[in-house]
Amino acid sequence: MSSPASITVIAETALALYPILLKNIPANLTTQLTARTATYAILAYILASASDVSRAFTGGLTQTILYSVLNLVHIGVSYASYKLLPAGNALALFYTYPFWNMLLGWLFLGDSVSLKSVLLLAVAFVGTYMVAMNSTIEEFKGQDDDEAKPQSSTALGVALALGSAITESLIFLLVKSPTSPSPFLSMLQLYP
């Protein structure tokens, strides 16, 4: 059960539960940010080598600050979108990040992208967006006027969910860059 594929499935399953947990556990954004960053920081220190720890806080201090600020923005917009939208809709919009990964990898890392990949991801992106938006609109249409969320709140939630996908892709771009010799160094820089 310790193959990379099974670990990935377990990690993605755990991450997919975040919106549900955030909706059901009453805590403010500061508490949520602190809990997440503390958990990942502890894991980073356990898994990283001594040279990774040294590099994160000496030669790569500016990079560590950049990574951690971007990560805090990512977590903040993700959690805020989970609060404003139904969990499934926010998560569906977040999972447009493969489209952004492909686009940013092509633009900044020189990744090759086939026309077929572009077309398939564009269809998936548009479909995901339409399903999430239609579901969001339908959910709020059926509510009484007194209970309905304002459209501006829904629009903000959609923007934040797409922002979480884009910041996820920016993190991917930074971590994938050739200057990162170890995944645990990147984890230390994201969660110092």
Image (tube, helix red, strand yellow):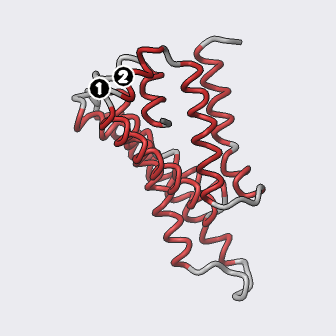
Quarter location, residue 4: top right
Asked whether, in this view, residue 80 is left or right of residue 86, the answer is left
Residue beneath disc 2 = 55
- Label pair 2/1, CB-CB below 8 angstroms: yes
Outermost residue on the bottom side: it is 146
Q: Residue 191 or 103: which is nearer the viewer?
A: 191
Q: At 60% across and 27% down in the image, what residue appears?
A: 43
Label 1: how many Cα within 10 Å (few below 14, some 14–19, many 20+): few
Q: At 30% across and 37% down in the image, what residue appears?
A: 62
Residue beneath disc 1 = 59
Label 2: how many Cα within 10 Å (few below 14, some 14–19, many 20+): some
Q: Residue 181 or 120: which is nearer the viewer?
A: 181
Name the residue type under label 2: Arg
Asked whether, in this view, residue 84 is left or right of residue 119, the answer is right
Residue 155 versus residue 43 in the image, above or below: below
Q: Position of residue 123 (x, y in %)?
A: 43, 47
Q: Position of residue 17 (x, y in %)?
A: 70, 43
Q: CA distance from mark 2 to mark 1?
A: 5 Å
Q: Residue 15 or 5: which is nearer the viewer?
A: 15
Q: Residue 90 or 38: which is nearer the viewer?
A: 38
Name the residue type under label 1: Gly
Q: Position of residue 151 (x, y in %)?
A: 55, 78
Quarter location, residue 107: top left
Q: Position of residue 105 (x, y in %)?
A: 30, 34
Element at label 2: helix
Quadrant (top left/top right/bottom left/bottom right) for the N terminus? top right
Kindly identify which numbered label has been placed on residue 143: none
Element at label 1: loop
